[in-house]
Amino acid sequence: MSVLLPGSLAEALGSLAADPDLVPMAGGTDLLVHWPQRTELHERSYLDLSGVEELRPHRWEADELVLGGLTTYWDIIEDRRAWNELPLLIDAARQVGSVQIQTRGSWAGNIVNASPAADGVPVLMAYDAVVVLDSTRGRSEVPLSGFYSGYKEMRRSPDELVTEIRVPRRAYDVQIFEKVGSRRAQAITKVGVAVTRSDAGWRVVANSVAPFVCRCPALERILEEGAAVGGPDDLLPGIREDVSPIDDIRSTAEYRENVLARLLYYDLLDLCPSFG
Amino acid sequence: MLRREGLSKLTGQERYVDDLPLEDFLWGATVRSPAPRGRISNIVFGDGVDWSEFVIVDHTDIPGRNAVYLMEYDQPALAPGYVRHVHEPVLLLAHPSREVARRALREVQVIVDVDPPALDFRSLPSPDLIQYGEDNVLKRLSIQKGDVERALAESPIVVEGVYETGAQEHVYLETQGMLAYLDDDVLVIKGSMQCPYYVVKALKPALNRSEEEIRVIQTPTGGGFGGKEEFPSMVALHAGLLALKSRVPVKLIYDRTEDMVATTKRHPSQIRHRTGVDENGHLIAQEIEVVMDGGAYVTLTPVVLSRAIIHAAGLYHCDNVRILGRAMFTNSVPYGAFRGFGNPQAHFAVERHMDVIADRLRMDPVELRRINMIRDGQTTATGQVIGDGVDRLQIVDRALALSNYERRRREHWLRNSEHRYLRRGIGMSAFYHGAGFTGSGEVMLDSRLHVEGHPDGKVQVLCASTEMGQGQITIFIQLAADRLGYDPAEISIAEPDTHRVPDSGPTVGSRTAMVVGRLVERACDDLCRQAGAARGAPVKDAIIAWHSAHPGERLLGKARYEPPPGIEWDEENYLGDAYGAFGWAAHVAEVEVDLRTYGVRVLDFVSVQDVGTVLNETLARGQVQGGVAQGISWALLEECVWKDGAMQNGQLTNYIIPTSGDLPPIRVEFVEFPYEHGAQGAKGVGELPLVGAAPAVLNAVAAATGRQPTEIPLTPERLMALLGNGDR
């Protein structure tokens, strides 16, 4: 095993261009969980980004919040403005793993780890976040909602690093985030959903119910059209159009569909006077 | 009194077996069966590692009998050509590098010609699945009282129910681990364990060694819960075999996944009740069938089944009782000792069933319990006359009062009709647990204990009882200090070392404070006698004086178990006094069910316990809270996911134990009814609190939802199936 410790972004991108097999590492919270078991990982080479200080800070622009490539959950939890303006980021961050994980794990790492159960991704996607990728070849920007194309497949070339995540600042009148895990902390999501409504319209994003975190266009259409919904089961056809949950070691497809329907139905009933 | 070893544990100074300094040693690793049943046709060694660097042990290296002996000789230490469960040990490897040893495990392929495995303990096996006796029944036991057939036939109402519980993993913080080395001709075993003399007992026949040639030392142990009762004998034997072959020290430490998938667990059960009652709720007949999954080898299953059937009728009086128990052989990892030892399964069924009966009779479940609860002078299912003077109704009433039971019930009723998706409920359980070994078990253990007075006047307790987090060291120091009139600082507990301490029996079965603690007191008395301490005079002075008169000699106060008078047990017919003393308790749980997620959250928990005299309230409270937490977790969260006899979720990310956020405040109160033959009046405390937790939680769920759950763990997925899709 070898570990490269770049001191600047330019150096990091240079290393990655020279050896695209390098595994970039930010907080290491996904990588290290299976470290003792997965000895094949021990033979790979790593690009430890912890010394690339310029990737760490996040900043508020006039019309967007820009997260750095190393910005952690904890950085946002500590930012009072985020509590007021983009509270779902806080809701999600506080439910990731444990405080220890929250202080190490990064938003960008959560995106590129590409787990269908990622907790940071649904809220970013519901806020229309844009992923900024840099390489020695230049910069590209991809809306998070179009970033994934399959299980662990994404629009990132091996020589690219996620250096920023741009989150538009908008006024929202509905904001919901629900994470259902098998316990109240240190839990991997069995089914989750983030919902927002702004001038840009409804966003419904679900996790752990498809090969990747995704928007749910059929459900968004139901909400846009203000169609009558008499009970949670009325949402099931839309859910089945949008997502494809499976039975696995953590839960069942039936449970995931049912719970997604019930969370959406009851939460919208509680929060949105026009719903029902 | 503060916990003696508390600070070193709290500050991380305590050294567990994996922390012990050691040089020039090998890391052991265990090659295991990939299949649940079949003949080993080949073992293929891959070329990813240099095998000449390894010490390899198979069953032909075992000098004595190839068995991990405790009750039977049926479980091989290493599979001799045929395997009976997934993860059964086949080979042992040792290498100076832990990493290389781990890699080597992936380079060995055990090829098994698979025979059809018996995996369902509920049904009787087809002929091709039979591997034990005529019908795969490991053990059959029964209890008869009165005439159940007639009484059921004459009962105006008969209520039936089938209750199921799943396997439970111990999840002690410290995984299984042992260290073995030769000290001249003596094989020294050090490690994490509850019962040093069980390890000696297992090693003697397998290694063909005498007790003098085996020295077993318990290292500070990070939790046991029964998982370190019999299983460490296997790990010790493996480490010992590697050390004997390599002639260098060997360390064998399981990682979490190996520990979870390959070691014993709580026996899964299916328990059937048929109960005859009259319109007023009086029990007329109880017919109970207890079926347990024993797994692939006997281990302690017969005694687990025994404890289950003895407690299966609950703490109620009924004239006509028949309890049939059977434990089935299956090709799964052997099930073994786990806190409660069969009684949690028994009480889950009977205490859930009481609420089902109450529901059928449209009766208050508390009232149903009240009118049937055993009173002094009445008898249990085995005919044991209860006469301990314990006010069992007071225990129940106190639990109801502390939990505001009646008020909560009314509040829930109102709230549930108004809230869109949250449903609250409150439920209770009343239960009991026999402390110490069953029947004549304590007599057969013949426990011994010494208390030594040293020339400087300090005193040391020599016993094989072990500290595993429950507080044994502190309690024994406290008992000896009280008895001798000593400052606790001048009393210590000897390291449990089978070459230094007598066999005071295993640290199991809620027996330590009550039974062995009594030996501490009696050995202290003997010490005073031998030192010639005059009544009322300082014992310390007498000890110092004795030593000046007897230079170079040891001053040992000794005690040997003596059964309390009047205890009679008929092992043949399961009749009589099953236990010298019972602990009695009641739990009340309040829950909230979320109909969006089908999740159950326990909001509040009250536990009122009679464990005799409470020796140390902080430790006792800790035992109760821990037991309740483990019981709630068994009821709602912990599920072993099986595939072809192998546990699929051997990680803490998917085998779910609770975080602090998943547990309610656990409010504990003791009512003390001292037991005259226990130390200072103590009865057992370790297991009792776990016993009634699951039924209390599920009874609360039943109250909240109006449905009757019968199976645990009651995961959200199971609750969804129970509630159906219609919202209530």
Image (cartoon, grey):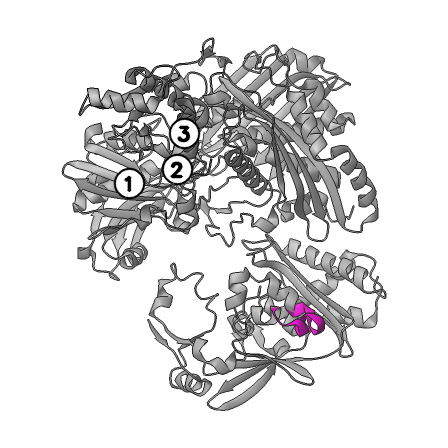
Chain hosting mark 2: B
Q: Mark 1 lies on which chain?
A: B
- On screen, A74 above or below B630? below
Q: Give the residue number, with chain letter if any, for mark 3.
A: B476
Q: In which quarter of the image is the C terminus of chain B?
A: top right
Helix, strand or loop at label 3? It is: helix
Residue B708 showing in the rendered view: no
Percent coordinates x, y for residue B30 in the rendering:
31, 48
Which chain is mark 3 on? B
The image quarter containing residue B711 is: top right
Q: Where is residue B254 in the image (x, y as percent from the top left)?
A: 36, 48
Q: Can you identify the residue that label 1 sits on?
A: B190
Type of amino acid under label 1? Lys
Residue B228: image tag: 2
Circle 3: residue type? Phe
Q: What's the amino acid at mark 2?
A: Lys
Disc 1 and disc 3 in contact, CB within 8 angstroms: no
- What is the span of residues highlighted in magenta in the rendered image? A78-89
Return the disc, 1 or 2, that comes first in the chain's sequence. 1
Please tell me which of labels 1 and 3 falls first in the chain: 1
How crowded is the residue under tag 3: few (<14 C-alpha within 10 Å), some, or many (20+)? many
Front residue of B366/B307: it is B366
